[in-house]
Amino acid sequence: MWLADIGLLFRRVRTRVLLLVLAAVPIAVAVAVRLSGEGPSPGSGPRFFDQITNNGVFAALVGLTVTLPFFLPLAVAIVAGDAVAGEANLGTMRYLLSRPVGRTRLLVIKATTVTIFCFVATFAVAIAGLIAGAILFPIGDVTTLSGDTLSLAAGTLRIGLAAVLVALSLLGLAAIGMFISTLTDAPVGAMAGTVGVAVISGVLNAVPALSWLHPFLLTHYWLSFGDVLRSPVYWNQILLNLLVQAVTVAVFATAAWSRFTSKDVLA
Amino acid sequence: MSEDLAIETTGLTKRLGHTAVVDKVDLAVPRGSVYGFLGPNGSGKTTTIRMLLGLIWPTAGSFRLLGETMPAASSRVLPQVGALVEGPAFYPWLTGRQNLRRIDAAGPDGQRKTRAARIDAALTKVGLGAAATKRYRAYSLGMKQRLGLAAALLRPRSLLVLDEPTNGMDPQGTREIRNLVRELASEGSTVFLSTHLLSEVEQLCTHLGIISVGKVVAQGSIEDLRGRGDAMLRVETEDAGDAAQVLDRLGLESIVVAGEVVSAQLDGQRPEECNRALVMAGVGVRSLTTDRRSLEDAFVALTGEGFDVAG
């Protein structure tokens, strides 16, 4: 059932398109930079952007930086919002439950699939960026934000760590998405609601007057993954981000469970 | 608390808001029966089935499936129950076979070793062998219905709950499904068949429960229920007048002569006795039928407005 559920997700055309679009972002960035001839001037563009021409591996980090505010949350919202409501909408939920699959078990299986998707989506971006960067630009030792140099292997490992942190950053949103998904039989509603949560969090985070609220926002520490490119790694914000995500997951996973195990399945 | 009942509900009630969609329903479905659960649209059939399968929680009352108290025994009992509820539902982007594989893998007893063989057998049984590798998206309504039945037949079942199984089928498919239900019943499965088609009940069922506006208004074996309505005898003969006299002497009532057709209420008389009497009296009987409409009459009488959706 675990494997079957994962297969179900990745056999779906929609999922594959999402992953392709995500992978296309860092590729498009790398190609655009290559075609423009000279590299971007230092300090311009998104973080790590000016580094691409020196070292292709930075295309992976640019990809993560560019997709994290919108594309990745969108993809996660689609998959998480669909997790429960999608089965209800198709009517397959009634056959799974009468099979019987325990409701708690079904929810855990769905959560596992969504978590795996968060990682696959993030790594699709990172790996596509690495490959595109390696093909289009020279690669070599990685200069950290602090100015030290890491060997290419160590640098790539750091980028892998950054991708893991990005994937973990998405879990809070995924949990919210799954909770909303248990509230409705309309997957589109659950997806929209989840995207809405991400957008609102982003907007609130941009209002300086609400700075007291910022540390509690789901998306506030999202870009902290870049701190793995410091030496030594600056863990403070990264750990705060993981804490925010962990609390969010705990709250909304519990809410989703209590809702789903008591609800009447009428679809 | 009877062991020979496949489904037994006691005061089963489901309220949505203020209305009782299912109201104190006491079902008794004997093991081995083909039980027709008959009612107009919106009478609470599907809601009852949803409760039996643990999809929704009863507001009040209790029920037992295959002799075990539910929903406590769900994980033991439900694997023995095959269900087709409110139409088939599958993933449009998977093929028929992939869909069956998923639903089989989802439960506790879908043994992997035998899965492929069981899926093939089920597909053949419902006549979908040729369309197994087609995506569900491309299936016609009848094919979808067949796949739903195939899913219900993936494993040997003690009880099959079929909610309007011939919905959307062409006449050929309807016949096949009916034969399939007969076959399953002869193999010993109890079949709980919800329908609003009286013809389906007449052709298939040994027992019948009639539900109307959430309440069971009649339940029992088909013969019992038929007996309750007054069966009609219909004789076609050239000697209509003589026939009417003979029937009158036998004690039949409401005798009506219309041209060459004499009809009368049997009123407890056996049709074969009537026939013998007619022939002995020299009446040339061209045809003699007992009017099967009595079941329909009983149904309409019990549910009131016939097939209108209950408000």
Image (cartoon, grey):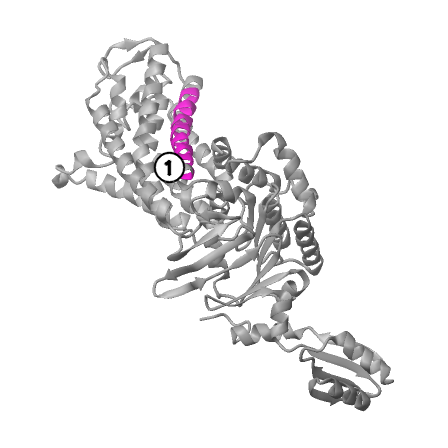
Across and down, in percent, residue A193 comes to 32, 47
Compared to residue A95, the image places residue B167 above or below, namely below
Compared to residue A80, the image places residue A221 above or below, namely above
* Residue A219 or residue B214, whichever sits in front: B214
Across and down, in percent, residue B90 comes to 54, 46
Q: Amino acid at mark 1?
A: Val
Across and down, in percent, residue B285 comes to 84, 80
Q: Is residue B214 visible?
A: yes
Compared to residue B181, the image places residue B132 above or below, namely above
- B103 drawn magenta: no
Residue B293, picture quadrant: bottom right
Query: On the image, numbered disc 1 is attached to which residue?
Result: A76
* Residue B68 or residue B40, whichever sits in front: B68
Q: Is residue A267 visible?
A: no
Compared to residue A53, the image places residue B104 above or below, namely below
In terms of secondary structure, what is the magenta stretch mainly? helix
* Residue B3 or residue B193, whichever sits in front: B3
Magenta span of residues: A106-132
- A115 drawn magenta: yes
Question: From the viewer's perspective, is B249 left or right of B45?
Answer: right
Across and down, in percent, residue B300 comes to 56, 75
Residue A242, picture quadrant: top left
Q: Secondary structure at mark 1?
A: helix
Question: From the viewer's perspective, is A201 left or right of A187?
Answer: left
Q: Quadrant of the C terminus of chain B?
A: bottom left
- Residue at 46% x, 37% y is A15
